[in-house]
Image (cartoon, rainbow, N blue to C red):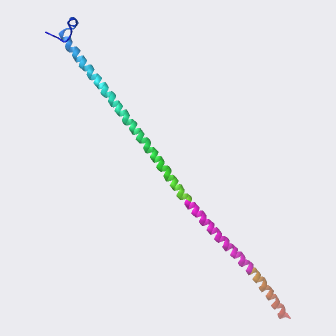
C-alpha cells in the first residue's frame, strides 16, 4: 500500500491517523476561508457604513444649507416688508404732518378771522351806540 506520507512518517502515523490529518487540514482550510470571508464581509460592511455616514453628512449639510437659505429668504422677505412698512409709515407720517400743518394754518386763519370779526362786531356796537 502506497501512501502520500513519506516512509519515515509512516512510523509516526498509522493509516487511520492520515485520514484525521486530512480532515483537520480541510477543516483548517474551511476555517481560514470563513475567516477570510468574514474579514471581507466586515470590510464590505465598513465601507457601506462609511458610505452611509458620508451620505448622512451630505444630507444633513444640504438640510442645514436649505434651512439657512430658507431662513435667509424669510429674513429678506421680512426685511423687505419692514422696509415697505417703514416707507409706508414715513409716507403716513408725512401725510399726518401735512394735515397737522393744514390744521394749524386753519386755526391761525380762523383765529385771525375771529379777531377780525370780533373787532368788526365791536365797531358795529360802538357805531350803533353812537
In the rendered image, which quarter contains the N terminus?
Answer: top left
Answer whether residue 90 is magenta in the image: yes
- Please indicate whether residue 15 sits to the left or right of residue 112 in the image: left
Q: Residue at x 20, y 12 (%)?
A: 18
- Image: 123 above or below 19: below
Residue drawn at x 35%, y 31% as measured from the top left: 43
The image shows residue 98 at horizontal and vertical percentages of 67, 73
Residue 66 as seen in the image, left or right of residue 120: left
* Residue placed furthest toward the left: 1
- The front one of 29 and 112 is 29
Asked whether 29 falls inside the magenta stretch, the response is: no
Q: Position of residue 11 (x, y in %)?
A: 21, 5
129 to the left or right of 56: right
For the record, the magenta segment spans: 80-109
Magenta segment's dominant SS is: helix
Quadrant hosting residue 96: bottom right
Q: Is residue 109 above or below residue 34?
A: below
Quarter of the image with the C terminus in it: bottom right
At a point 48% along the width and 47% down the height, the residue shown is 64
Q: Quadrant of residue 48?
A: top left
Q: Is residue 85 above or below residue 73?
A: below
Q: Residue 80 placed where, x, y %?
A: 55, 60
Residue 93 appears left or right of 128: left
| Residue situated in front as seen by the camera: 63 or 111 | 63
Residue 8, image x, y percentages: 22, 5
Amino acid at each position: 500500500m502506497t501512501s502520500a506520507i513519506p516512509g519515515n512518517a509512516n512510523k509516526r502515523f498509522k493509516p487511520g491517523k492520515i485520514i484525521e490529518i486530512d480532515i483537520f487540514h480541510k477543516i483548517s482550510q474551511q476555517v481560514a476561508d470563513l475567516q477570510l470571508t468574514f474579514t471581507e464581509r466586515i470590510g464590505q460592511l465598513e465601507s457601506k457604513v462609511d458610505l452611509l455616514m458620508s451620505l448622512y453628512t451630505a444630507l444633513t449639510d444640504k438640510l442645514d444649507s436649505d434651512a439657512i437659505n430658507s431662513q435667509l429668504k424669510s429674513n429678506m422677505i421680512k426685511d423687505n416688508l419692514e422696509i415697505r412698512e417703514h416707507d409706508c409709515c414715513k409716507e403716513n407720517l408725512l401725510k399726518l404732518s401735512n394735515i397737522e400743518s393744514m390744521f394749524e394754518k386753519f386755526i391761525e386763519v380762523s383765529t385771525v378771522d375771529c379777531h377780525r370779526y370780533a373787532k368788526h362786531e365791536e365797531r358795529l356796537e360802538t357805531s350803533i351806540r353812537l
